[in-house]
Image (cartoon, helix red, strand yellow):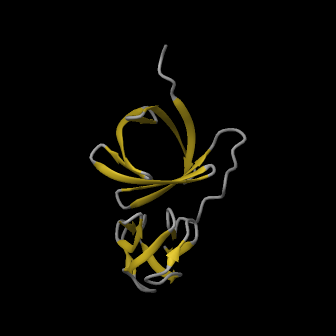
Amino acid sequence: MGTRVTRLTLVHDGEEYVVEIVDAATVRVNGRDYAVHRDREGAVRVGDRPAWIARDRDTRWVFLDGRTYELTDARPGSRRRAAGHHGTLTSPMPATVRRVAVAVGDRVKAGDTLIVLEAMKMELPVRAAQAGTVSSISCREGELVQPGVPLIELDD
């Protein structure tokens, strides 16, 4: 008898990804295999890189390499939520704001750390996905923030 593969179609920024959970140690994304190892609840290793995963209904947030990916289940019948604006940065999971590294009016480059969150005793740097100017900051250090709530807005 063969191994049962769980197959999902997920959407991130309008692009569809076929994700197959091959077994407890392998995930295939668009035909490419990745070795995974569960460290603890919500924390995994993808190869030698740490990642954190949070889930709420049909949405998963994957935090990898300083970026947050919001993945929405695209199976027929699943509830799709509208994607956030590209210039809006949110938390991937409930977290505490440890440091805000920018101010309104600052010009940032793609990859710059804008805010550092703490969740599950881990620091999670949130980086700019694109260059822009910080137009608003909706959080402060020490504040508990929830997933999907805008923290920082960037204008082109």
Residue 27, how many percent across, how many down? Answer: 42, 36
* 71 left or right of 99 in image: right
Q: Quadrant of residue 119?
A: bottom left
The answer to whether residue 83 is above or below residue 139 is: above
Seen at 41% across and 55% down, the residue is 52
**Foreground pick, 134 / 76:** 76
**Closest to the observer: 71 or 128?**
71
Residue at the far left in the pictured view: 48
Considering depth in this image, is 1 or 5 the residue closer to the camera? 1
Residue furthest to the top: 1
Q: Determine the image quadrant of residue 36.
A: top left
- Residue 152 appears in the picture as rendered: no
Give residue 101's position: percent from left, percent from top.
36, 80
Query: Residue drawn 41% across and 63% down?
Result: 120
- Which residue is painted at 47% across and 34% down in the image? 21
Instruction: Residue at 63% x, 51% y: name it.
Output: 57
From what the image shows, is residue 123 above or below residue 33? below
From the top left corner, tell me how far across and down residue 123 is, in percent. 35, 67
Residue 14 versus residue 22 in the image, above or below: below
Q: Position of residue 29 (x, y in %)?
A: 45, 38
Q: How many marks?
A: 0
- Residue 23 seen: yes
